[in-house]
Image (spheres, rainbow, N blue to C red):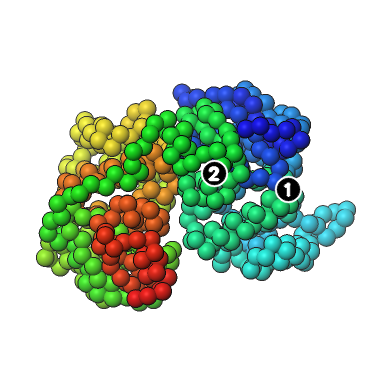
Amino acid sequence: MKVTTDDLVLEMHKITKSFPGVKALDGVNLQVRAGSVHVLVGENGAGKSTLMKILSGEHAVDAGEIFFKGVQLTHQNTRAALELGIAMIHQELSPVLDMTIAENIFLGREPMRSRWLNLFVDFERMAHETQALLDRLGLPYRAGQKMRELSIAGMQLVEIAKAISRNAALVIMDEPTSAISDTEVAMLFRQIADLKARGVAIIYITHKMDEIFQIADDITIIRDGQYVGSGKAADYDQNSLIGLMVGRTISSIFPKETVAIGEVALSVRGATRHGVFQNISFEVRKGEILGLAGLIGAGRTEVVRAIFGLDPLDAGEVWLHGQQLDLKKPTDAIRHGIAMVSEDRKAEGLVLCRSVQENISLANLEKFAPGLFLDLKAEAESGQKMRNMLQIKTANLNTVVGTLSGGNQQKIAIAKWLLRDLTVLILDEPTRGIDVGSKSEIHRLMTQFAKQGLAIIMISSELPEILGMSDRVVVMQEGKMRGELDRTDATQENIMALATGAHA
């Protein structure tokens, strides 16, 4: 990519960073123009977040040079980065939920009433300046609102407002749309366009191909910690970009195969939870992948939580192989061969501070400890079996799960259930926040499970995934079931019409 020095707000040359036993970055380059959106792409574990944490001062660089607005940066830390005008919005937001929007925006730099003593915070001025900022940005919030009243998208927009209030010249956004609706994405993109118009540079990290080509001006690809290349977004298409990201051609992101569909495994009849969802009925058969589609907030996750025994049903029945189940808690579902991989693997699916082996064993402790003591040999053999079957990339089974990429974490969240005798596998957003290569591997595993006769329920907010992997699609809207489509009838238009209530 040819750019003039005058265009550049950021230059990173030959950036190298190592952690114990791992070379995370090896000679990576990045050049970002003022008033542009620069998308940084690569598989999970490629080094994108490490590069951004170096830029934002969270990590020290081992070798290489960083120039910001033409000035070389040395001894970088987070406070220095913020003062220079570099702001980072992390994928995992960490607002202070019981403080107001104004207090969050001015956190750590509150205006004081006294010019000399600095004893009291000037809350009135803080609220006034925050409201003026929100109004200028067209955000429908009040300065005095508590952060916990906002959606995830709202919190992200407040983070952008905070960056603008600091007069940031460069804003880093890490997976900002991973958990928000299409309407909220449109709102976020409007703010990004406004930032561009103000001359602010944006580094944008995402795994969503449609977003890349919708929003990017420039693209930089890194793979396995190494610089692959940069260019104008118009110079790439989806296939060429995927090939550069993963270093290989992926023949199909959705490797769906024709599988013999067997008898009904799970039947849900009139499931109702007052105020959440009502009168939900569907069946899923052995060897079938049933897609649950709908907009965020449609009630899909709430339905499968009830099937798994996490939340109580007020009415309705769940049947397995012709037997009605009494599901009061998850152990009831697990005992009957129903497993669920939740949408938030970090909070609900894994113990991030424990090893790969311990996480795989977590749902199977009675198998490895029939008496007083844990059978370490059997546990290790089963862990190695899962590692090989799911192709989990880890140095060894003692590696801490929190250090692995999102795709490998998701495989571990699935692996712990495969040691059991399963009938039904529920996958809630199985590929959220993971790269295209890992998505293809998860989809391959789903096809493999279906061929083995497992009944699979898949929730996904990505329509290509629903269309690519489902044998049938059940569409929900506002807690109600709006329709059921066979694979041949499941088109993007038909699903969205049902999901938005355009027709019943």
Q: Residues within 10 Å of mark 2 (few under 14, many from 20)?
A: many
How many numbered marks, from 0 up?
A: 2
Give the x, y percent position of residue 454.
Answer: 19, 51
Identify the mark nearer the N-term, 1 or 2.
1
Can residue 196 be seen from the camera position used here? yes
Q: Is residue 183 left or right of residue 249?
A: right
Name the amino acid type tagged 2: Ile
Residue that mark 1 sits on: 199
Question: Picture quarter containing residue 184?
Answer: bottom right
Q: Residue at x 37, y 70 (%)?
A: 498
Outermost residue on the right side: it is 116
Question: Picture quarter containing residue 169?
Answer: top right
Q: Nearer the viewer, residue 39 or 104?
A: 39
Give the x, y percent position of residue 256.
Answer: 27, 47
Q: Is 489 above or below relative to 212?
A: below
Name the amino acid type tagged 1: Gly
Q: Residue at x 34, y 56 (%)?
A: 466
Can residue 308 be seen from the camera position used here? no
Q: Is residue 449 left or right of residue 478?
A: left
Alpha carbon of mark 1 to alpha carbon of mark 2: how far?
Answer: 19 Å
Q: Quadrant of the C terminus?
A: bottom left
Give the x, y percent position of residue 367.
Answer: 19, 43
Q: Which mark is residue 205?
A: 2
Q: Residue at x 68, y 56 (%)?
A: 194
Give the x, y percent position of residue 359.
Answer: 32, 41
